[in-house]
Image: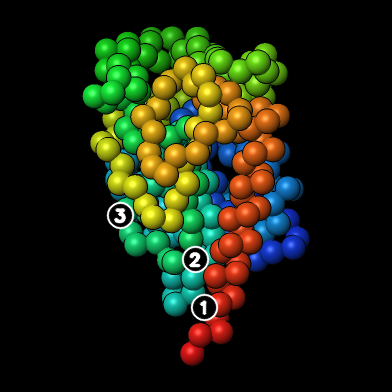
Amino acid sequence: MTSPWQKIRTTPGSDLNWLWLPGWSFSADVFETFYDELPGHHWAADYLNCAVSFETAAASLAATAPGTGDGVNLPAIWIGWSLGGALAAKAFSATPAPRNHFLVTLATGQRFLSDKTGNGMPTEDFEAFSQSLTSNAETTLKRFTGLCAQGSSEARSLMKQLKSSQHPVRSELNHTLEWLRYEDLLPSLRSLHLYGHADALKPSQMPPVELSPGESHAFFLTTEGKHHILERLHQLAEQLQHESAKQEKMP
């Protein structure tokens, strides 16, 4: 099986694996400001080229995750934004993750389309968005970037940052857009789901929920949001490495 994972960078100071999955239409460059801040090996998967179903893509990500297989299970933190978080969560539920792995999702709804609470995107809006992507992809992507930044006091700079990491118009975007029809995701005990304030996409929240001080769907790129998530990720990394060291000492 060909691995969709690519090594982005190694930041000295740790053997921890960081597995990054960006949101729909974005590349892993959207996480660029985090790599140097977190010691370890940074990997990302460009799932845009996966011409398969959502479930098959998630299973492939789980089966080829760096640091796993052949009796080797190195500590890892999966971090997915929006659709990337849904893929990571699905991978966790499809294949039992090692005990020294942890899942962090950013603005990922338990489902993307509206649920009974009214959160999520209404189906009719999603259908209109899908048709717009087919008829006028460039304008639709620009509109989507605006939705991701909407609600933030840093919206202008946030949109500029998002545009720099967005894929150009490609037919594969239509295929992966359909993945957003995913059904309810199963919660994992070893997970944390972070959400920002004033998220225009109103994701239906998965437990355990933690609210970030950042705003918008891309809250993790705002000043307050980035500071908060870095603090949490450093805490989780320390926890995983401590647990991994204890397991190694066990007979």
Foreground mark, 2 or 3, reads: 2
Query: What residue appears at the point 30 percent right and 54 percent down from the top-left corner?
Result: 94
Query: SS at mark 1?
Result: helix
> In front: 16, or 233?
233
Query: What residue appears at the point 39 percent right and 33 percent down from the top-left corner?
Result: 205
Q: Position of residue 54 (x, y in %)?
A: 32, 41
Determine whether, in the image, residue 29 is placed left or right of residue 74: right
For residue 138, say whether it is visible: no
Determine whether, in the image, residue 56 is placed left or right of residue 235: left
Residue at mark 3: 94
Label 2 Cα crowd, 10 Å radius (few <14 / some 14-19 / many 20+): some
Residue at mark 2: 100
Residue type at mark 1: give it.
Answer: Gln
Query: Which numbered disc covers residue 172?
Result: none
Q: As displayed, is residue 25 above or below residue 69?
A: above
> In front: 116, or 16?
116
Q: What separation in Å lies between label 3 and label 1 (alpha carbons)?
A: 24 Å
Q: As displayed, is residue 83 above or below residue 241?
A: above
Q: Earlier in the sequence, mark 3 or mark 1?
A: 3
Picture quarter with the N terminus: bottom left
Query: What residue appears at the point 53 percent right and 28 percent down from the top-left corner?
Result: 196
Q: Earlier in the sequence, mark 1 or mark 2?
A: 2
Q: Marks 2 and 1: in contact by CB < 8 Å?
A: yes
Query: SS at mark 3?
Result: helix
Residue type at mark 3: give it.
Answer: Ala
Query: Which numbered disc covers residue 247?
Result: 1
Label 3 Cα crowd, 10 Å radius (few <14 / some 14-19 / many 20+): some
Label 1 Cα crowd, 10 Å radius (few <14 / some 14-19 / many 20+): few
For residue 207, say whether it is visible: yes
Q: Earlier in the sequence, mark 2 or mark 3?
A: 3
Residue type at mark 2: give it.
Answer: Asn
Examine the image and state in which quarter residue 125 appears.
top left
